[in-house]
Image (tube, coloured by chain):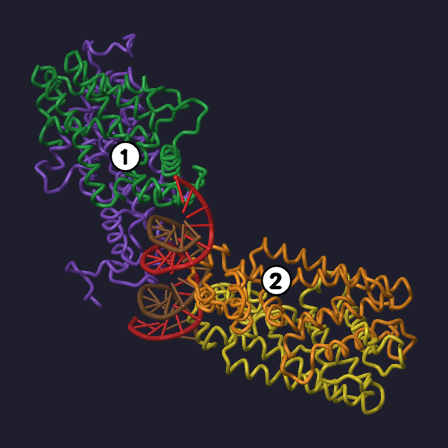
Chain colours: A orange, B yellow, C green, D purple, E brown, F red
Amino acid sequence: MAQGTAEVPGRARPLPERLLEAATRLFAENGYENTSVQEIVAAAGVTKGAMYHYFAAKDDLLYEIYHRLLALQTERLERIAGGPGTPEERLRDAVLDVIDTSCAHLDQLTVFFRSMHLLPEDKRRAVRAERRRYHERFRALVEEGRRDGTFRTDAPADLAVNFLFGAVHQISTWWHPDGALGPRDVGRYYVALFLDGLRRAGDTGVWPPSAAAL
Amino acid sequence: MAQGTAEVPGRARPLPERLLEAATRLFAENGYENTSVQEIVAAAGVTKGAMYHYFAAKDDLLYEIYHRLLALQTERLERIAGGPGTPEERLRDAVLDVIDTSCAHLDQLTVFFRSMHLLPEDKRRAVRAERRRYHERFRALVEEGRRDGTFRTDAPADLAVNFLFGAVHQISTWWHPDGALGPRDVGRYYVALFLDGLRRAGDTGVWPPSAAAL
Amino acid sequence: MAQGTAEVPGRARPLPERLLEAATRLFAENGYENTSVQEIVAAAGVTKGAMYHYFAAKDDLLYEIYHRLLALQTERLERIAGGPGTPEERLRDAVLDVIDTSCAHLDQLTVFFRSMHLLPEDKRRAVRAERRRYHERFRALVEEGRRDGTFRTDAPADLAVNFLFGAVHQISTWWHPDGALGPRDVGRYYVALFLDGLRRAGDTGVWPPSAAAL
Amino acid sequence: MAQGTAEVPGRARPLPERLLEAATRLFAENGYENTSVQEIVAAAGVTKGAMYHYFAAKDDLLYEIYHRLLALQTERLERIAGGPGTPEERLRDAVLDVIDTSCAHLDQLTVFFRSMHLLPEDKRRAVRAERRRYHERFRALVEEGRRDGTFRTDAPADLAVNFLFGAVHQISTWWHPDGALGPRDVGRYYVALFLDGLRRAGDTGVWPPSAAAL
DNA sequence: GATGAATGAGTATTCATTCAT
DNA sequence: GATGAATGAATACTCATTCAT
């Protein structure tokens, strides 16, 4: 009924959504610790009591931000990884997709990597479990590609996935939606660098792990 | 090599060092905002007054942690990058070295990526400038390798460096000194993945992806 | 005797009763200020709106607890005090009875003495008035016994009643229904101590103390 | 140096004392739960930080109030109970003394009985332990008097002590320093009532515990 | 150089109560 | 009768920093 507070035409967004949105933006801008609950509720146009009606604590907002991002990415990954195509094609598509969604949810990503350590132990454990599942799905894809002879086997699959995730997360520190490169540009380049590094290669002259100096 | 910071053995280390050491450990364990000045001085065995004698503010500790890590890594990078060998050899050594020092200063690295955004604007700008210089030196090395035909030119050098840094920073989230892999193991694998991805390659049959798949 | 408050067995007790019962238990366990309205209504299995339908404020629950206990005790006292028997016999029976009902309504008693001061002024005045009436009825009984020569007159009757009430109230701090002494045991002992102290006695050689000792 | 804040001539009272004094008065007037830390520090003329410099929590003030009162009364009791005189004389003096100190520390006594249940579990346990020691010392005195044939043995000594303490605590609910009765008046009457009740007595005609009606 | 008492501005959270439905 | 979302005012507690000694 009260459509007055709606900013997009149609229906007023539910309050929990508006609170999470405001929190995400403020956490990304100023950091979780430098954002007061007061600022969040002011940005959402309500009072503290309203927020505590939906979220038991400030860190519930943080948890929910993580949880939603992870749920989204996990769901997309599972769809792609379980779809048709060679392991390499599916890994390529998964990387492109995670970069897409990372760019589309840049604030969440920023908050995630800066502030996960601020969650209380139980919630942190929950996030880590969700994160592990995501990681494992990616790793399984890499191992599929190793079994079919596409990917190198001289480096642990786990480590390759960490290598990739690092690169992807880093995106939140330098990429900007108004910059020269769109998400798909970044995706193409990252796919090139990552997959060419991961692919089974002949002796390149740089890499004998046997080198005593190492 | 670096014996320079070691004091006379058996002697008490100077107070500023002890304070920074305590702060680094506590910031890494509990986060900057969850660590009180009182906890830091207690861990260093002194009182608040002593700390404020050496550091004008709590965030000076944070800044100093960043500054020292960056100064160390920049100095090492410049020595390696300016040394003998092909660009590829020097880049390889630089990557191995940054992984070495990252593992050796894991707490600093952790604090760096979690808490840089908590610095006041002026100090944050200073850190960013130092960081940029470091980044630029790495990029120059990549570009040397592009000019001599070793590295691919179909992805921006900037982006390749960001790609690498992401992977390196990520190390602080999964690597542990007591784990199965030593710093050199991680280094070898990362060098393999990164340099094989960066090296000029023939058509691998996967790239570019067909438009339909995107 | 008092079967009056029992509803049809098997039927749900009326809501106000259930709310008061829950409130009494929670107030006794955790204190009035540490018990939220939310906890009370949850314990009674309803929502806040339902409670506010019957009680205008949280302190109405508190007042009602006092009021019911006082009404009960006053009614019983008046029946005993106005009944047959010597003043001493009636006082004895009144003491036994107040100990009985105190043990039977231990939670109410506990709440009464801990939290009466938390009532708003007007309700506190109302409770004090009811309480005074109760006190006065007891005092009148003592004075009857003084007039007929049974009780000592060398201590104010008022003070003797306060003396007794203190002892009775204290019961809520040490007595427990599962302990070795039943309400009647406590009653017998208290009657002995109180009435033997109150009875007119010859010079016992101890009293008055010599001035020096004081 | 700064003697300006001193209200009594001589030295400025130390801040912890002033805080406890203010807290005691306010807790007695308005109740612990209705007294804010802000009110306490305002009454003591300092800021919150100063209070938290000395007391870790609001309930530390409460604990300290109890602890000091108990320590005082225990010390006095032990001096009297361990002194010269018959058990009856020492018990008489102890009762007179506890009434004296109760009247002299009426606010503490009020707070004690209203708010002890608000202490966190560990502090409550500590207070109970101190309280028990006090109770036991009193009980030992009663038992001395039973052994030498002065006091009745047909009621448990424990119960007699509880009986007495209830009467004494009650004093804080009706006695006022400006009233007609001084502490010594109250003491004399209470001693009379209590000791005459406790003394071994012949059959008084009211007390055969064998009475079937009981 | 160093202490520690004191400041004061800030924080997350609680909760009795209201009111449109 | 009853719901539950929302209010708004209050609360205990924290902590970086200062400054007289």
Q: Split into 4 quadrants, where in the image is the N terminus of chain D?
A: bottom left
Per the rendering, the mark at residue C66 is 1
Per the rendering, the mark at residue A66 is 2
Per the rendering, the mark at residue B96 is none
* Nearest to the observer: residue B200 or residue C151: B200
* Nearest to the observer: residue B200 or residue D85: B200
Callout 2: 10 Å neighbours few (<14), some, many (20+)? many
Q: Amino acid at mark 1?
A: Tyr
The answer to whether A16 is drawn above or below residue C122 in the figure is: below
Name the outermost residue toward the bottom.
Answer: B147
Q: Quadrant of residue A206?
A: bottom right
Image location (x, y in percent) of residue C182: 36, 19
How many marks can you see?
2
Q: Is residue D175 left or right of residue B104?
A: left
- Picture residue at 50% right of the left edge, 76% below the top: B60
Q: CA distance from mark 1 to mark 2?
A: 51 Å
Q: Is residue B175 left or right of residue D186?
A: right
* Contact, mark 1 vs mark 2 (Cβ under 8 Å): no
Does the image show residue B19? no
The answer to whether A30 is drawn above or below residue B77 in the figure is: above
* Nearest to the observer: residue B204 or residue E11: B204
The answer to whether B77 is drawn above or below residue D134 in the figure is: below
Callout 1: 10 Å neighbours few (<14), some, many (20+)? many
Q: Is residue D113 left or right of residue B43?
A: left
Image location (x, y in percent) of residue C188: 28, 16
The chain containing the residue under callout 2 comes to: A
* Nearest to the observer: residue D101 or residue C193: C193
Q: Amino acid at mark 2?
A: Tyr
